[in-house]
Amino acid sequence: MTEAPPLTPSEAVELLLAGNERFVAGAPQHPNQDAVRRAETAPGQRPFAVLFGCSDSRLAAEIIFDRGLGDLFVVRTAGHVAGPEVLGSIEYGVSVLDCALVVVLGHDSCGAVAATRTALTDGLGTAIGYVRDVIERVTPSVLAAQAAGLTSDDDIIAEHIRNTVDLLLDRSRILADQVSSGRTAVVGLSYRLADGSARLVTTRGLPVDAIVPGSTT
C-alpha cells in the first residue's frame, strides 16, 4: 500500500474542523476506527496533529473531531496548563512524529479557570494539593483578561487559550523553529459543551488564506 503524503498545516486544520462539523451535525463517519486501521498502526504511528487540551471528560479528542486510531497525538492536563512534561510531549509530536499541527483546545465552563477566578477573589485557602499548582499556572491568563477589561466566561477562556499558545512558542525553541520554517502551525480552539462546536480563537504559522473568517491571529 502506498503511504499518503504528509498533510500541510492548512490541510490538517481543515481535516479537524471538517470532522468537528460532522460531529456537531450528528453525522460522524468514525474514520480509522476499524480492525484494518488497528493493524496498519500497530508497527508505528504517524499522527497529523498534536492535540493539547483540557482534561475535562467531555473533550474526548477523537470523538469531537471525528478521527480515529493514529490520527492525533493527545496531551491533556486540567486547564491545559503546560509544564516541562507537556512541552516535551509536544516537542516529540512535532520533531519526531512530524505532526503538521499543534492544537490548544480550551472550552467553556472550564473548572480550572473557574477555580482560578475564585482563588483570585477569595484566596488559595480552599485549593488542596497540586490543584494549587494548576490554579497558579492559570492565574496569569485570568489576570491578563481582567487587565483587558474582559469579564465574560467566553472572553476569559479565549484569553487563556491565546496565552497558552504564546507560552508554548515562547518556551519551546523546537516548536517555534518548526512554525517559523512553515513545517508546523499552532492554533487555539474553544469548544462549546452544549453544541459540540470548536471555534478558532488564534493561529500561528498558517497562511493568511487558510485562516477561518472570524478568528484572531
Image (spheres, grey):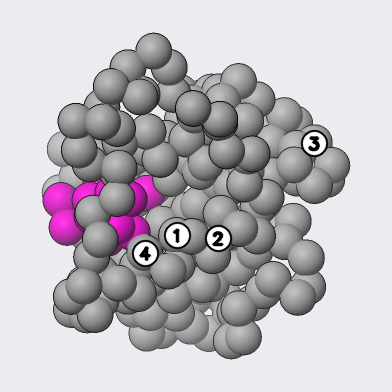
Would you say residue 68 is visible in this rendering? yes
> Over which residues does the magenta segment extend?
52-67
Badge 1 vs badge 2, beta-carbon distance below 8 Å: yes
Q: Which residue is mark 3?
A: 177
SS of the residue under disc 1: helix
Does label 4 or label 3 sit earlier along the sequence?
4
The mark found on residue 16 in the picture is 1
Is 92 magenta? The answer is: no
Residue visible at 72% across and 29% down?
174
Position above or below: 153 against 140:
below
Mark pair 1, 4: CA separation: 5 Å
Mark pair 3, 1: CA separation: 23 Å
Badge 2 vs badge 3, beta-carbon distance below 8 Å: no
Badge 4 vs badge 3, beta-carbon distance below 8 Å: no
Q: Amino acid at mark 2?
A: Val
Q: Is residue 131 left or right of residue 154?
A: left
Q: Which residue is mark 2?
A: 13
SS of the residue under disc 3: helix
The local crowd at label 1, few if under 14, some if 14 to 19, many if 20 or more residues have their Cα within 10 Å, is many
Of circles 4 and 3, the one toward us is 4
Q: Which residue is mark 4?
A: 19
Q: Amino acid at mark 3?
A: Asp
Q: Give the percent coordinates (x, y) of residue 96.
A: 60, 20
